[in-house]
Image (cartoon, grey):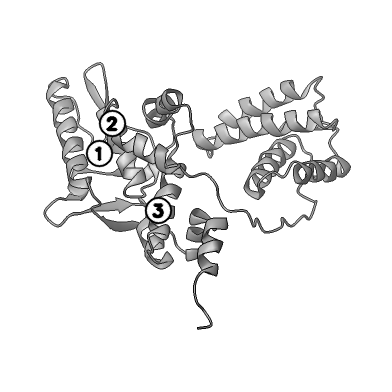
Amino acid sequence: MRRGRRFQSWQAAADHFEQDLRTDSTLSLRTVTFYKETAHVVLRFMESEGLHTLPHQIVKDDLIKLLDAMERKKLAIATRKGYLSALNKYLLHFGNSCLQSLKYKFPADTRPTVEWYSPDQVKLLLSDADKTPLQSIVLHCELCLGMRRVEIIRLRPIDIHDDRAYIDVLGKGPQGGKPRSIPYNKGTREIMQLALKRREEQIASARPGSPIPDKLILWEKAGELHAYSEEGWGLDKVVTIPLTKKYGFKVSNHKGRRTFGRALYRAGVGVPTIARILGHESTEVTLKYIGVDLDDMRAAMSVPIYC
């Protein structure tokens, strides 16, 4: 903590904030990155609105004006919550509890989650032959099986049941995650065979005697094989980031999962079934994924409910 310290700019304060976050062994790299990057965004936003940005200067009036500005800009509720979470961490780090003492209840976000791929984008992602084997494997797991990024990283060869056409998945949660099984989709058998073949080739080219991780997805350095970290950005650096640059639209794991859930919903699959496939603990989470838009409402109005 740096209570009482005065900084000349919010950038200097944010740099100290980041340095101390990195020394906190209780925080993962992904959490540190979230706080660091989001704090910069919200402080820059406050600066553009003419609000105080130094940790010892920010008061409740600044926060009320910040909330008004976010409402005026029509930011998504999830975005506002992320901004305030990072700002609260930043302020508490310097001994300022004004945000924590501000009792504010966010309104319900009535907008659907709009982070879906268009049909043309899905077709491009799945059909483009000019992708690495790893990119093809990850995209299939996201767009055709609805798997989370961490679930793809945790996947092992023994989790693939080709004879019965399903895979075992370890989802979110402690002790390795909550298990579930996902049946094969169209093309899954070929993708799993591609993944196993790629792994066998990596093992064959690895340095003799080097340890072999039990994961399906591996990377190689200096003749040694490694599993991708669940916390780092290693898998994104070779899959989603290059594809985003290549195609000119954002490619991400959550976007793929949402698109998969949305496609099932529009195909007439019930929400409870979609929730089971995606590994959601409640259908409320699933409903946020699939959303409801004007096309859905038009379809509802065409249903003969009174005759």
Using the image, determine if residue 12 lies above or below residue 123.
above
Q: Quadrant of residue 247?
A: top left
Q: Pointer 3: what residue?
A: 263
- Badge 1, how many Cα within 10 Å: few under 14, some, many 20+? some
Q: Residue at x 41, y 37 (%)?
A: 121
Q: Quadrant of residue 8?
A: top right
Identify the residue position indicated by label 2 in the image: 134
Residue 242 % position (x, y): 41, 24
Which three-letter amino acid code belongs to the residue tagged 2?
A: Leu
Q: Secondary structure at mark 3?
A: helix
Q: Quadrant of the N terminus?
A: top right
Quarter residue 238 falls in: top left
**Mark 3 packing: few (<14 Cα in 10 Å), some, or many (20+)?**
some
Q: CA distance from mark 3 to mark 1?
A: 29 Å
Residue 216: give x, y in percent of width and height.
23, 38
Labelled disc at residue 215: 1
How far apart are the two marked residues, 2 and 1, measured between alpha carbons? 14 Å
* Residue at the limit of the structure toward the bottom, as seen here: 307
Instruction: Kindly identify the residue that appears in the image at 34 percent across and 33 percent down.
Output: 228
Q: Are marks 3 and 2 in contact (CB under 8 Å)?
A: no
Q: Residue at x 55, y 47 (%)?
A: 114
Question: Relative to 163, is 174 on the left or the right?
Answer: right
Q: Is residue 242 above or below residue 265?
A: above
